[in-house]
Image (cartoon, rainbow, N blue to C red):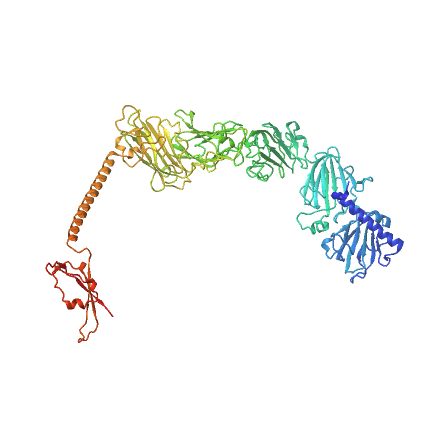
Amino acid sequence: MILGNSPNGKSKMRSIEWKFTSWMLALLCLSCGYLSGQDCDQTFSSGPQAVTKYGTFASPNRPNDYPENKRCMYKFIGQKNEKVKLRFTAFRIQGMPPTCRYDYVDIYIQLKDSTVDNLLDGPVFGRFCGESLQELPKLLISVYNIITIVFFSDTSKSDKGFQGEFEFISADPYNIGVHDSSHECGYTINSKGVIRTGYIMSPTYPGVYPDNFRCYYLLQGESTERIKLVFDHFSLFHGGDYCPFDYVEVKDGCKPQSQSIGTFCGQYENVTLYSSTNCLYIEFVTRSGRVSFDTNSYTNIADFAFERTGFNISYTFSSYFVSLDFIQKEQYQEHILGTECDVRIGSRGRSNGTFESPGYRTSFPLERTCRFYLDGRMSSTELEKIKVTFHDFEIPGTMPNCSAGYLSVNLRGHRDPFHEDEKFCGKLWPPDLTSIDPRMILTFDTHGASRGRGFFAYYSFLPDFAIAGGKSILEGQCQFLFDSKERKSGTFNSPRYPNHYPQNTQCVYIFRPDQRERLLISFDTFSLWNESHRIDPMCLKTDSLEIYDEGEKPGDYYSIKTYCGVAFPGAILTKKGMKAIFRSYADTQNLGFKARYEYIPESSKDNLNPGCGQHIRSTGAGGVIKSPQYPNKYRHYTYCEWEIEASKRDNKILIQIDVFKLEGDMVPKDQKKSFEGTGCQNAVLRIYDDLEKSLLAPDELCGELYHTAYLSTDNIMKIRFLTSSRALGGRGFQLSWTEVHSTGTCYGFKCQTSGYCISSDLRCNGLPNCGFGTKIDDSDEICPKQAGAQILHIAIGTSISVFFCVVLLICGVYHRRKFRTRDRHSPDHDHVEVRYVAANTSGSNTTDRLLSVDQKLDHTDQILPQPSSEEVDNRPNHHSQEHVDNKHPRPVRTPRLQKVSIV
């Protein structure tokens, strides 16, 4: 085994190192004279002739720096019946704790004598250096009558040193009983003789206790006595909730193996403990290597930075403490260890029994407080509550104050253990008490009371379904009645909500309105989802909530809808009674549901939008149904009901959606987890047949829907629109309804795809009336009259187009013939004649003029005179001259002259 691998091993290694170092120092001092300490060693003794019992001590040369290369020993020796009390008032030693490699001070508080040999064998309390008193123990008390301090300085440098105070105090307060000679710190305290009260102090209290120390204290009274402990002052190092370092453990018995009352560390004051027998065993244990997880890595190993002064515990032996004979162990009642008379009664699974106050039938003890804890079962599969019925009761006093003795009840002891719901006193029996959670606490207080019989009561543990507001129909069964005569509104929920509901549970909720009231139910929370929904979307074999409506006969219910998954059910309204059944199975658990119920008078004008809806008797055609204020938003608290009746019993009613936009969502948001979406929590449209027993829609209708149709099973169709009090409003809906003729020859219009026979008056009305088969059927919107008009328009347009084409063709032919005749009498090419005319030299204008003739711009025919030979000769371009037959002159167009400027 390697000692360094455990805290105990580390402490042993450290102890060995200190012993070896001290031994080597002493050996060098005594044998070789390497260290000279004779001039600084000091001994402070408390002999019989001592003038004073206190004084001071200091390092060499104090207040100047202490010398280098010194070893000094300070011995404080008291008498056999004394202890040494020591405190440092100043401290500056060169070095860094906790290693202290240079200068240091070693302190020994567990020495039995002051010889050097004993110093080598004794455990070192601690080695100290540095510049802060915070790293030192605030106060030291010797275990026996000696404290030794060894001061060492090396050859490098020094500091101011230390200074302190000492005092020799009496050891009598620490002699607390018969000392066990086989144990360093073991005592037995008996109540025989005159000793009935006293106190127990840790060996070094109020100084810092040493490491790796163990003490035990056995308190033993007479057979009829019990023992009381009070922690007047208690301060141990707190290393965690389970006290892994230093602790005091109190055990209810005479042996170390007795049952533990509790293990204590940290700081306590005025904690009171009682034994259940005449013995108590107290064990005090300390360890080394303390670690604080609340500080940094440097400070967490500084043991003396934390106050750990030990304890001062007072004790009392007495036969006047409450006798525990009233506890019926055969009823599985047990005394709560450490208390004077507190009792715990635990459930054995729907168990029952009786319990009584201390001293019942004679007289209860005075100035006492006893508590009864009745604890039902609470687990993932079980939850219980407690019912208490009194069969005798007498505590003198006057209600409701009960200032001089009382019995109080806490119905929610698991949630709030210090709460008091009610107090009882006098001679009248309290009413039956039923807890709200799995724990009921009864407090029996007799302070200031006069004597009385006390009480005797019967208890029973019942299944608790945590369903508030309803009246339990059958005790122990999950059946609750919500009667309008009791409450007009409230909530109901799945078992144990908001915790997960239990498995294999069935709960029944019955709602009973008055004759002129309606019942409105809306859901706040709904979560009954599990994996089985993937294969069972109809909620047949999974956790579910089934809604039943009451028939003509009271108590005759029929199912209208079953809900499961996570989709919110739509609001529900009924004029008669209603029943809901919740079912859970063995393989699932979830949050469950919470819902609200309201009983609303039918005469109320402020609720449910009166006057909305109507009874419609068809004449064989159809019509339109719109939500209130459509196309504006509908309101919250709205209820509308339409009943449509066909003209003949064999005909049916077809409902087809034209526009539909309500709050909610029927589309699953996560197809992998559930078949449901958010549900129709605040607004819902339901479609029923005449018996109102089957919801024809596959789901309650909400959200946005398109091209959806529903056909009744007989000649009557009912539509109900309902919004909850939390509805925000939406655009609403517009539905078309159509009477479908089911028998005989169709004398109206027969839809092409669905095959429905409807009134011919519904054709081309701008609304869907044919429903749909494998695809959308809008054949009723394709009308013959409308088609003929379209054909006529096409024919007229075509005729006009043909007419204009003919006109254009005739014009083109005429124009072509005309120009072809003209071309026969005109030259092959158009000509432009250019003449050059010389300017008159006698004139002032010397600019030549160039004239161009464009025969295309003049359409006047005339005979031009022939030019003379002179003129011809003067033309610059003779090749462009046209030869004209003088005998047969031909008409030519008069050319149009254009002036062209020549610079």
| Residue 78 can be seen, yes or no | no
Residue 268, quarter of picture: top right
Q: Which residue is drawn at the image coordinates 63% and 34% (left, top)?
A: 451
Image check: 167 left or right of 705?
right
Q: Which part of the image, by quadrant, shows the N terminus?
A: top right
Q: Which part of the image, by quadrant, shows the C terminus?
A: bottom left
Residue 239 in the image, given as x and y percentages of width and height: 69, 45
Report the front residue among 535 and 247.
535
Residue 602, quarter of picture: top left
Report the front residue among 116 and 671.
671
Residue 756 in the image, given as x and y percentages of width and height: 31, 28
What residue occupies the far top of the structure in this picture? 744
Q: Which residue is drawn at the image coordinates 42% and 24% (left, top)?
A: 556
Q: What is the tally of numbered marks visible in this picture?
A: 0
Image check: 857 left or right of 766?
left
Report the front residue among 115 and 312.
115
Residue 11 in the image, given as x and y percentages of width and height: 76, 45
